[in-house]
Image: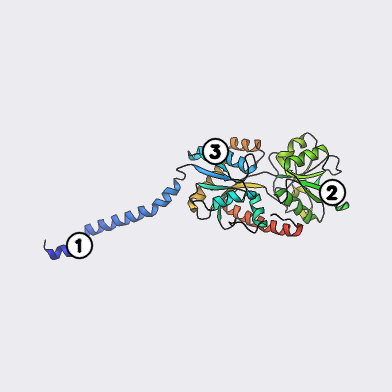
């Protein structure tokens, strides 16, 4: 071969390559390109390949923490990777949420979101993150229904009678919730708004509110169902209604606000939910896989028994539905806060 012909070969002159060789080279290049393009998808399908961290923004023993530990244990079995619940408390849940918003968006650090995060987004103006923009919803998994209950001396056997009692005695009744600017507080304020009634709010913790209602120091409470249910079953409290859209498997005989038959409450629902959010740049394939796996494990009867033992109802919502619910709740809580004068520093 001459020097000139060698230079033409190096220049890639197609006329010097046999047709079969050219075809083989093109196939090889195409195969290499397709393999490279498919590598990220394949890597995402393999998720997870190392431990996954769920960040709970409240102390151990609460709804978010229990959801993370029960759900995480079952997901860990499915994934054959540990799921670690890390409690990062502070600033009403904002410390842990900020940590996740800035985490590597690879699906290995997820936020155990609670309905209270929507309350924070509605009330707090100086958050260092945006709940609706800096996170990608994965799924909701559980809820802890909110119960309106009364001491048996209150002359109301159901929500319709209680509403009539409030209307007959404006500003005469007090009620206790699980704290200022909690979902329990918002439940009652929304109920008051819809029924055009009034009552004074006295913030407590759930446990203290229940104890005082059982002891007769309080007449009306809006608390997490699990904290009051034993006393309802013993006849020491009378259950009036649950704020959830559907009745709870924990107490199927307790009606919802919607079941009251009152036209103004036919669409009433305040959900006290827990689930998972990911940093906003997390790949969709990873988010979809976790969503699908959460949906699958929530069908497990053993897991449902564990949730019931912790006072939690299964409450699966897809990532898309979670996004809609968070946005709607932030808007609703802002509106009710302005009407009721609810503030949170």
Q: Nearer the viewer, mark 2 or mark 1?
A: 2
Would you say the residues marked 3 and 2 are in contact, meaning their CB atoms lie under 8 Å apart?
no
Contact check, label 1 and label 3, Cβ < 8 Å: no
Q: Give the residue at mark 2.
A: 173
Frontmost residue, 295 versus 82: 82
Q: Quadrant of the N terminus?
A: bottom left
Position of the C terminus, as image quadrant, is: bottom right
Residue 125, picture quadrant: bottom right
Residue 74 marker: 3
* Residue, disc 1: 10
Q: At numbered mark 1, what does the secondary structure look like: helix, strand or loop?
A: helix
Cα distance between the residues tagged 2 and 1: 92 Å
Residue at coordinates 60% horizontally, 52% vertically from top-left? Answer: 322
Q: Taking 105 as reference, is 311 left or right?
A: right
- Mark 3 or 2, nearer chain start: 3
Residue 274 pos. (x, y %): 62, 46
Using the image as rendered, state which of residue 129 and residue 242 is in the foreground: 129
Residue shown at 58% from the left, 50% from the top: 97
Determine whether label 2 and label 1 are within 8 Å by CB.
no
Q: Earlier in the sequence, mark 1 or mark 3?
A: 1
- Pinpoint residue 193: horizontal percent, then vertical percent: 78, 56
Helix, strand, or loop for circle 2? Answer: loop
Q: Nearer the viewer, mark 3 or mark 2?
A: 2
Residue at the far top in the pictured view:
234
Q: Position of residue 176 (x, y in %)?
A: 78, 46
Crowd rating for badge 1 (residues with CA inside 10 Å; few <14, some 14–19, many 20+): few
Residue at the (73%, 40%) spot, across then down: 207
Q: Using the image, determine if residue 4 lies above or below residue 33.
A: below
Q: Earlier in the sequence, mark 2 or mark 1?
A: 1
Local packing at callout 3 (Cα closer than 10 Å; few below 14, some 14-19, many 20+) is many
Q: Residue at x 85, y 51 (%)?
A: 166
Separation of residues labelled 3 and 2 (CA atoms): 45 Å
């Amino acid at each position: 071969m001459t020097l000139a012909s060698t230079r033409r070969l190096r220049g890639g002159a197609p006329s010097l390559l046999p047709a079969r060789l050219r075809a083989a080279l093109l196939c090889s290049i195409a195969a290499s390109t397709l393999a490279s393009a498919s590598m990220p998808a394949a890597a995402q399908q393999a998720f997870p390949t190392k431990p996954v961290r769920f960040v709970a923004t409240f102390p151990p023993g609460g709804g978010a923490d229990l959801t993370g530990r029960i759900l995480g244990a079952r997901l860990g079995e499915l994934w054959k990777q540990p799921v670690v619940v890390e409690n990062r408390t502070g600033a009403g849940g904002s410390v842990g949420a900020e940590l996740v918003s800035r985490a590597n968006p690879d699906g290995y650090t997820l936020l155990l979101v609670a309905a209270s995060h929507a309350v924070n987004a509605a009330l707090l103006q100086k958050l260092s993150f945006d709940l609706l923009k800096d996170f990608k919803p994965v799924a909701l998994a559980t809820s802890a229904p909110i119960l309106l209950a009364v001491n048996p001396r209150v002359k109301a056997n159901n929500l319709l009678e209680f509403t009539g009692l409030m209307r007959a005695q404006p500003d005469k009744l007090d009620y206790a919730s699980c704290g200022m600017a909690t979902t329990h507080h918002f439940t009652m304020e929304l109920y008051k708004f819809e029924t055009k009634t009034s009552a004074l709010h006295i913030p407590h913790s759930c446990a203290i509110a229940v104890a005082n209602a059982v002891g007769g120091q309080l007449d009306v409470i809006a608390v997490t169902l699990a904290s009051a249910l034993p006393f309802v079953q013993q006849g020491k409290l009378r259950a009036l209604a649950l704020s959830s859209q559907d009745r709870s498997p924990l107490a199927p005989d307790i009606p919802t606000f919607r079941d009251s038959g009152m036209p103004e409450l036919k669409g009433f629902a305040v959900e006290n939910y827990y689930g998972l959010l990911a940093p906003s740049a997390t790949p969709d394939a990873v988010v979809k896989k976790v969503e699908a796996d959460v949906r699958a494990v929530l069908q497990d009867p053993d897991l449902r028994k564990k949730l019931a033992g912790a006072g939690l109802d299964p409450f699966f919502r897809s990532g898309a539905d979670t996004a809609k619910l968070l946005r709607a709740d932030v808007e609703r809580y802002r509106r009710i806060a302005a009407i009721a004068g609810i503030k949170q520093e």
